[in-house]
């Protein structure tokens, strides 16, 4: 994704799965590793620089078929991270916890609920995120870190709802100035004259192919830096890749989702699913048209 830094951890042993976290390039962030006993199979942890401190953000997937050993690692990770300012989010598959009353059924669910309470973490999601269960949760070390949390329609073919929320911390933006080469304004006549004066036979004499390539590359880089001017790079413009019809269908789908969430009727859900199918079909047709256009160029 353009403009974002990606942090990921793929699922081992089989294709698919894993977790991925995108953070804007303008935000100072770096990946961290936890203690060995807290190294989860599907979790990624990052520190975000916020003024003179840091906020640890974690994304976790806990499988419903998790082993006792891996489950212990998830608990150890939460214990370790909860000592700092943190936000922990993900699909934990603890569907039998009633977060409004802080009650649960089942040993594993009760152990997780005890862990959250003993770690003094706040759980912000109180509504169902998949069918009638609260499987996806957002934990924070301070309640005020999370604001304006919303449960939105599923993304694509997922059966989990999207979770939107705002993280309220004071951050520092990366103010590094970026430049790009203005090749269309390069002084190519001076470049050719400069290269013509180099005694290539003497420089490349008795050199291996690799050594010759490195010398040639170094000289070309030097020439480009010398004769091609730089330009301060501004913000990239957002290009619209969707047609008006596709945007209209997406808006209609979103409206039908809100109607279904408000009424909860099977009829409204059927209308929403039909709208979702129309959007996916339209996007697939547009994607194929774009690919065919690129092949003709």
Image (spheres, rainbow, N blue to C red):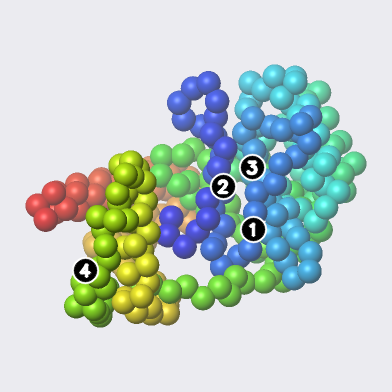
Whether tag 2 and tag 1 are in contact, CB under 8 A, the answer is yes
Q: What residue appears at the point 74 percent right and 26 percent down from the top-left corner?
A: 71
* Crowdedness near tag 2: few (<14), some (14–19) or many (≥20) residues, C-alpha within 10 Å: some
Q: Residue furthest left?
A: 296
* Crowdedness near tag 4: few (<14), some (14–19) or many (≥20) residues, C-alpha within 10 Å: few
Instruction: For marks 4 and 2, give the CA distance.
Output: 46 Å
Whether tag 3 and tag 4 are in contact, CB under 8 A, the answer is no
Q: Residue furthest right?
A: 118
For the C terminus, give its image quadrant: bottom left
| Depth order, front residue of 133/83 | 83
Asked if residue 295 lies left or right of residue 160, the reply is left
* Crowdedness near tag 1: few (<14), some (14–19) or many (≥20) residues, C-alpha within 10 Å: many
Instruction: For marks 2 and 1, give the CA distance.
Output: 10 Å
Residue of label 1: 29
Which mark is drawn over residue 196? 4
Instruction: For marks 2 and 3, give the CA distance.
Output: 7 Å
Q: Position of residue 207 (x, y in %)?
A: 33, 45
Image vertical order of residue 182 relative to residue 63, above or below: below
SS at circle 2: strand
Whether tag 4 and tag 1 are in contact, CB under 8 A, the answer is no
Residue of label 3: 44
């Amino acid at each position: 994704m353009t403009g974002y830094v990606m942090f990921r951890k793929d699922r081992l042993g089989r294709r698919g799965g894993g977790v991925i976290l995108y953070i804007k390039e303008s935000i100072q962030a770096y990946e961290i590793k936890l203690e060995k006993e807290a190294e989860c199979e599907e979790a990624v942890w990052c520190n975000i620089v916020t003024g003179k401190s840091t906020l640890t953000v974690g994304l976790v997937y806990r499988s419903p078929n998790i082993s006792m050993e891996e489950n212990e690692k998830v608990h150890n990770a939460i214990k370790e991270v909860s000592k700092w300012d943190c936000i922990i989010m993900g699909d934990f598959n603890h569907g039998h916890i009633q977060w409004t009353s802080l009650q649960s059924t089942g040993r594993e669910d009760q152990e997780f609920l005890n862990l959250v309470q003993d770690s003094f973490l706040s759980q912000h999601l109180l509504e169902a995120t998949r069918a009638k269960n609260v499987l996806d949760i957002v934990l924070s070390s301070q309640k005020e870190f999370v604001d304006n949390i919303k449960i939105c329609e599923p993304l694509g073919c997922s059966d989990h709802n999207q979770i939107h929320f705002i993280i309220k911390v004071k951050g520092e933006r990366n103010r590094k100035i970026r430049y790009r080469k203005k090749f269309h304004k390069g002084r190519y006549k001076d470049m050719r004259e400069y290269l013509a004066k180099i005694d290539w036979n003497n420089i490349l004499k008795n050199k291996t192919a690799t050594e010759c390539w490195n010398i040639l590359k170094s000289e070309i880089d030097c020439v480009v830096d010398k004769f091609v001017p730089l330009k301060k790079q501004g913000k990239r413009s957002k290009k619209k890749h969707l047609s008006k019809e596709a945007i209209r269908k997406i808006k209609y789908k979103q409206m039908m989702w809100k109607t279904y969430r408000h009424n909860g009727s099977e009829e409204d859900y059927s209308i929403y699913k039909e709208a979702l199918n129309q959007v996916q079909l339209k996007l697939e047709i547009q994607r194929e048209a774009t690919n065919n256009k690129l092949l003709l160029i």
